[in-house]
Amino acid sequence: MIDQKSVIIGVILGMVLLFVLGYAIPSFSGFTALILAGILVGYLANQDLKNGAIHGALVGLFTAALTMLILILRTGGSQKIAGLLLILALITSGS
């Protein structure tokens, strides 16, 4: 069973560590932040090794998705994506 509270804590910690470590060691910040957040979530899940690994993987997945969304919004790429989604919606609706 997934412990949602520990995954949310891990995602928040991963995002904070990603930005803090991004200034200290830019080349390894993403990797280091996700490793530290994954270890913390594995400890917070307080179950066996398999569930700790699953929780850590979820933290990595959600943190990466959130980071990509922030990057898309910062670079202005959301206009292109919104246009592509509109075109895709028109094509799939049959209009």
Image (cartoon, rainbow, N blue to C red):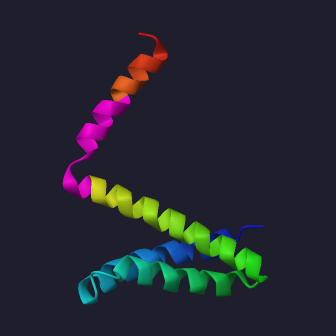
> Was residue 79 drawn as part of the magenta stretch in this picture?
yes
Residue 41: image quadrant is bottom right
Residue at 46 percent of width and 67 percent of height: 63
Residue at 65 percent of width and 68 percent of height: 4
Give the residues in magenta.
Answer: 73-85
Residue at 56 percent of width and 80 percent of height: 38
Is residue 36 shown above or below 2?
below
Which quadrant of the rendered structure holds the C terminus? top left
Residue at 27 percent of width and 82 percent of height: 26
Q: Count the marks.
A: 0
- Is residue 3 toward the left or the right of residue 23 in the image? right
- Is residue 46 toward the left or the right of residue 61 in the image? right
Residue lying furthest left in this view?
A: 76
Q: Nearer the viewer, residue 8 or 30?
A: 30
Where is residue 48? Give x, y as percent: 79, 82
Q: Nearer the viewer, residue 28 or 21?
A: 28
Is residue 7 shown above or below 85?
below
Where is residue 70? Give x, y as percent: 32, 60
Main SS class of the magenta portion in the image: helix
- Is residue 77 toward the left or the right of residue 38 in the image? left
Where is residue 69? Give x, y as percent: 36, 56
